[in-house]
Image: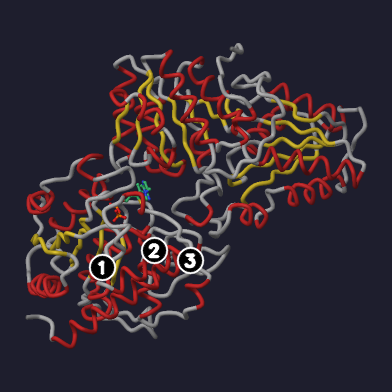
Amino acid sequence: MPESGLTWTVYDADKMTQREIYGAVLADLGDKHPEIVGLSADLAKSTKIGTFGDKFPDRFFNFGIAEQNMFAVAAGLAKAGLTPFVSTFSAFASMRACEFVRTDVCYQNLNVKIIATHGGTSFGSGGATHHATEDLSIVRAFPNMKLVVPADAIETAHAVIACMRTPGPVYVRIGRGFEPRVYEKTEYDFEIGRAVEMKPGRDITVIATGVTVFHAVQAAKILEADDKLSVRVINMHTIKPIDRDAIMKALTETRRIITVEDHNYIGGLGAAVAEVIAESGKGCAFQRVGIPDCFISHGYPEDLMNLYGIDTDGIVAKVRDVMGREFETDEDWEDEV
Amino acid sequence: MALTSQERTDLKRIGREIRETIVDVTGWSGGAHIGGSLSMTEIVTILYWKYLRIDPKNPKWEDRDRFVLSKGHGGVGHGVVLCKRGFFDFKHLEEYNHTDSMLGMHLDSKKVPGVEVSTGSMGHGLGEAVGLALGARVLKKDWRVYCVIGDGESNEGSIWEAAMAAAHYKLSHLIGFLDRNRMMIDGPTEEVMSLEPVADKWKAFGWNTRVVDGHDLDALADAIEAAQAHTGSPTMIVCNTVKGKGVKFMEDDPAWHYGGLNSELVQKAKASIAEM
Ligand SMILES: Cc1ncc(C[n+]2csc(CCOP(=O)(O)OP(=O)(O)O)c2C)c(N)n1
């Protein structure tokens, strides 16, 4: 068995959604960790935490459609010494139960792991009531919370396992089933708080998270072939704590950075990266790509990502735009500080 | 008898047509919340064809009654009703769920004529209905507010917060319908999170409460007219229904909360409805 303890491979993951592999990995973890309990709010089937529930019926609780109470109970279970995994849609974990997550879970720094599904635009036809394009910014503002957005199924598996090594609250945001594979190998260096370089590059860096990592890699390939650009792609799977080193390295080495996220461009990945850059005192051509601060329409998730420019096409266009901008690329930082 | 025999025959026929169209839309849209749309068909049919004071050609008419589908995932059922009642063209049903179309899974008040509030997140609609009812009082209007809630939805604390407020403010012009189909997503309500004795709960919260067979048009008519005549408190009509009603292979099966239908299943479903 590999060091991570993961029994699933990228080949299994090819046939599974992020939700499915989450349920399967949690059910595996349940053997080793009798302290794990599962909670859902009439979404055991939809979020796949039900896979754990079927295996450990005595350690699984369905609260009906009552998310606020579910998070209060999770806090109580954590206080009792257990490790609750709580699953509902991202919109309801971050917004319906918001204060319960903030005050009961985060303020008391409790060991509650939130696996929130159907993040970003992935609910598609569900419309505004079910889209979660604000959750990253909401949850990022909670002290003690760690915020992870896995890029594909195998990364979801690593993130769920990493939850058990990470004390305190963690929010893992996954999709609905529209997550293409980005990793070639099952094992790589996954650590909460450390970004993964998907592709080296010198001219510009695309920092992406979640499902947009796939699109960033695709875009980089197109730009390399058509525009002869050397595009670095960073998978910032952890938005909090953010990997400052990876950002500063990209800043000094490529001097142009784009962030991409399936989320409002306010408050999430783009904001976290911008904060690091601004506070460094170094200049850099910079562009956030995300949902442009609006309630999005409903439709197929792929269409929506295209419509709002957060897919491969959108990233290619934005990179060209940023490459065309006036920006000082000399080595002399002094005049820019 | 609140219904004439002509009305009864007409409403039955309309209900059957609505069910058939719900099946069609579920087929061509790739999937819809069909189970809970079929369970509430009689409730919305009798409201839209007999009791709601509305003008489909003037959906924003100031004095209209307000209808709120608190269980907003019944969007496909509500959409079919609004279309058949003349609020918009049939082509919108054909484009149901399409990207940027008018009708999505949950009906959007910003897009769809006749939809008062954007629901879909459980436990919001009843509170908004309380606001619409209080609004009528402040503005000295005589519109009534009708609101359909789900039984799974009734797990939400906010439903009971709204229940308290409506009773506190004696909103007798607010008439609620509990679509008591006994199913939610993860299974039967009494297994997932027990709700019984649910009629007693509404009584205890100060609501004028009545239990009816939610597929019996005459019983619904009697209950609605009694509610309209009632003063001093809001009314909750607990409607015992069957999830997936009319399509035998869907009835009482939580797997049909949301689903898609290929053309073979569409035909099978319609044959079942024809026998109703
Ligand atoms: C706040 C919230 N949590 C979860 C959901 C997901 N969800 C949609 S429908 C549904 C079940 C609804 O059950 P019920 O109210 O009984 O409706 P019906 O059986 O009549 O379709 C759930 C959990 C939601 N829409 N809103």
> Which residue corresponds to the image point at 79% horizontal and 28% vertical from the top-left?
A250
Q: Residues within 10 Å of mark 3 (few under 14, many from 20)?
A: few
The colour scheme is secondary structure
Q: Looking at numbered disc 2 in the image, what kind of residue is underneath it? A: Gly
Picture quarter with the C terminus of chain B: bottom left
Q: Is residue A53 left or right of residue A290?
A: left
Q: Position of residue A133 (x, y in %)?
A: 54, 46
Q: Position of residue B42 (x, y in %)?
A: 24, 70
Please, which chain is the residue tagged with disc 2 on?
B
Q: Which residue is mark 1?
A: B135
In this view, the mark in front (3 or 1): 3
Q: Is residue B263 left or right of residue B152?
A: right
Q: Which residue is mark 2?
A: B75
Q: Looking at numbered disc 3 in the image, what kind of residue is underneath it? A: Ser
Answer yes or no: disc 1 within 8 Å of ligand 1.
no
| Residue A268 falls in image quadrant | top right
Q: Residues within 10 Å of mark 2 (few under 14, many from 20)?
A: many
Q: Which residue is mark 3?
A: B263
Answer yes or no: disc 3 within 8 Å of ligand 1.
no
Picture quarter with the N terminus of chain B: bottom left
Query: Is tag 3's residue or tag 1's residue first in the polypeptide sequence?
Result: 1
Contact flag, marks 3 and 1 (Cβ < 8 Å):
no
Please, which chain is the residue tagged with disc 3 on?
B
Please, which chain is the residue tagged with disc 1 on?
B
